Amino acid sequence: MSGDGSKRKRQRGKGDSGAGTQPARGKTVKEIAAAANVSVATVSRALQRPEVVSEATRQHIHEVVKRLGYTPNAQARNLRTARTRLIVALLPDIANPFFSEVIRGIEQVAHESGYSVLLGETQSSLVREQAYADMVAARQADGIITMSPRVPAIPIQGRLPVVNACEYVKDSQICSVYVDNVAAAATAVDYLVTLGHRDIAFIAGPPTSPICVDRELGYQRALQRAGIAINPVLSAIGDFSIEAGERAIELLLSRGQAFSAVFCSNDEMAIGAMRALSSHGLRVPEDVSVVGFDDIRFARYTLPALTTIAQPKNALGREATTMLIELLNDPAVPPRKRVLSADLVVRGSTAPHRP
Amino acid sequence: MSGDGSKRKRQRGKGDSGAGTQPARGKTVKEIAAAANVSVATVSRALQRPEVVSEATRQHIHEVVKRLGYTPNAQARNLRTARTRLIVALLPDIANPFFSEVIRGIEQVAHESGYSVLLGETQSSLVREQAYADMVAARQADGIITMSPRVPAIPIQGRLPVVNACEYVKDSQICSVYVDNVAAAATAVDYLVTLGHRDIAFIAGPPTSPICVDRELGYQRALQRAGIAINPVLSAIGDFSIEAGERAIELLLSRGQAFSAVFCSNDEMAIGAMRALSSHGLRVPEDVSVVGFDDIRFARYTLPALTTIAQPKNALGREATTMLIELLNDPAVPPRKRVLSADLVVRGSTAPHRP
DNA sequence: CGGTTTTATGTAATCCATTACATTGCGCTG
DNA sequence: CAGCGCAATGTAATGGATTACATAAAACCG
């Protein structure tokens, strides 16, 4: 009986066989368990939930772990627990100072909560956006914070682990954190009105993004409130770059319609606008007041320093991350939109209108 | 006898038992294999090495995969293959425009090679640096690109999967990519000398970093070459921030030693210097010429535009990543130091000396 | 002191894809 | 046609930790 004595199973476990030249495999729980004379379960528990093992055992195991220099294999843990503690931060452009400050807020909260941040720069490419979203489907990341106005499709069932930061998607089940762009833009324009300006130009952002539409809306509302007619000749569109700000001013000036102030949809365009204005011999703020949006770090250091709407960049990142982590811990939390406040910061680029 | 007929093994595999409320488990190879009437091995092969399965089978499997919406679990794959295709980018501060452009280069190459980038902002904290390094030990990332002058300890045997970018560590087996800071700084100062300046101030960076020492060395060499005595009263130290540049100028001016030019160890301090100078009624470049280092994006847009040393930021990131990936593919490649060139970009902040 | 909790630990199943090795079937050659 | 080689596929071991369930030992209780 028992005719299977010869069934030579492959037994080249790491413990015995001669070849000491194996490729640098890390230590495993098994080895620690053996060295500490306990079971793998106990080792795992001593490391994960120290309160359930006896004081003596725990200390002993920790001592062995330290002595042998053991670090649990995160891949194995992740596979078993089905969590990666990784979140993807999707943004169009990391070199944009606005985003890089938001990212920093994301990184902070993530780190505090034991998560790490995977950088997903998309260059606004749908393909790349999708590629990062697929990492969630592949369980290589737990969730996504997206700073673009689109929410990528993730072929998983259940609630999408996605939070929208800075941007937001209308009518959706997606959590978002952003500022009230309409109100903020209106505040900026109100301020210009207060200073006596009536011919206020506007440099818009790409109309594909809802927040740009909102900023334009705010501009229009403020004008209406002040009884000023909206003049399309005083509007130009830019792509958020400094160069776009310059071009926009060129365009506005070429139209021949005078203006004594210009509200820009972001700081970089405002910086471009200031340059273009001064290269046309127009002084800021004496001849033209300029207001930006975002309050990037350099806004404070332009000459003159830029009056702008300060977005709580760090808080946007922090809040978005907090939301995402909440969502990851409990997929049943209801979708929320959180609106942070953005305040006008008056600096040197604005002055009372001089007729 | 045989008292084990009752040994109810837990059989709650996903196929049968009633509760349809299970928590959104993803599809597995097994299910695909079953649906396609092949073995798991064949499915895996069809996806990983399509050339080894027959044309018909491959098409059939792909069809099933698509129909059922299957995405292989990356954690499982990673565990098995012992690679994560993740690299950590360690940097002190993501909001620093210099680093964010380097990061972009890193992200690009990583993406081209099928890697993703884990953002490791350290705030120059050793603890956080180490925490990210430990992710490599925990096999949660394959390697590290560090932009700080330290190389964290990673308790793994064999070659450390680390590349140093922008900074470098002396006498080490670590791969690095950086510019010749001595030569670049000397070029900048040479240029000021050519313009007739002899009283050239210097704003140094934190002396803990070798590249700062190098920049100072370059400054000194250029002066020596020109037969100008090095005057310690004309040097100040800053921490790379705009404010530090302002403070440095205050300090230099307070010392009473006249200077007609100042070379700053980075652009942000140069921007601060320009502000401080003009708030003291000194015109740039008419009264004082200013040169920076890095050529961050805003350097082009200051008033006057900043003359500076252009570091190939994108290339630094790209090259570092290329090196790291090479190293990951073949740990036997010899350690290399790669020096990229940095060129002087002359803009408006420098002018001939006017006695 | 027998019986019931509680506490500490062990055993083995599980997560899911990859892949070494085994097997099957077919075409080709001498 | 036996025999060999190659191509295609299958079976099951493997990676390393977590954890459900089982068990043993200790504490508690009337």
Image (cartoon, coloured by chain):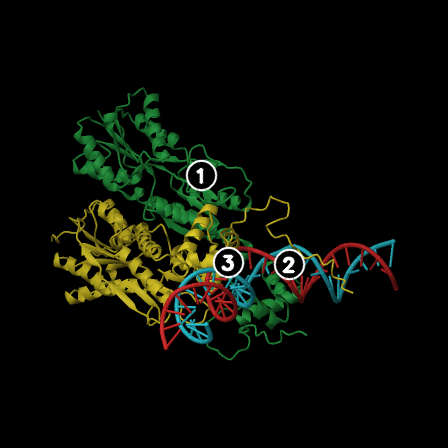
Chain colours: A green, B yellow, C red, D cyan
Other residues around mark 2 within 10 Å, as few (<14) / some (14–19) / many (≥20): few
The chain holding disc 1 is: A
Q: CA distance from mark 1 to mark 2?
A: 38 Å
Camera-nearest label, 3 or 2: 3
Residue behind mark 3: B39
Residue under disc 1 on the same chain as residue under disc 2: yes
Quick one: SS at disc 2?
Answer: helix
Q: Is residue A111 left or right of residue B100?
A: right
Asked if the residue under mark 2 is in contact with the one under mark 1, i.e. CB atoms within 8 Å, the reply is no
Q: Is residue A152 above or below residue C26?
A: above
Q: CA distance from mark 3 to mark 1?
A: 47 Å
The chain holding disc 3 is: B
| Marking on residue A51 | 2
Camera-nearest label, 3 or 1: 3
Q: Is residue B226 left or right of residue A167?
A: left
Residue at the extreme top of the image, as rendered: A227
The quarter in which the N terminus of chain A is drawn is bottom right
Q: CA distance from mark 3 to mark 2?
A: 44 Å
The chain holding disc 2 is: A
The quarter in which the C terminus of chain A is drawn is top left
The type of residue carrying mark 1 is Val
Q: Is residue C7 above or below residue B304?
A: below
Where residue B157 appears, as percent x and y from the top left, is 45, 71
Residue behind mark 1: A177
Residue C4 lies in quadrant: bottom right
Q: Residue at x 48, y 78 (%)?
A: A20
The type of residue carrying mark 3 is Ser
Where residue D23 appears, as percent x and y from the top left, is 73, 64
Q: Is residue B115 left or right of residue A355?
A: right
* Residue B82 visible in the current orientation: no
* Residue B245 visible in the current orientation: yes
Quick one: SS at disc 1?
Answer: strand
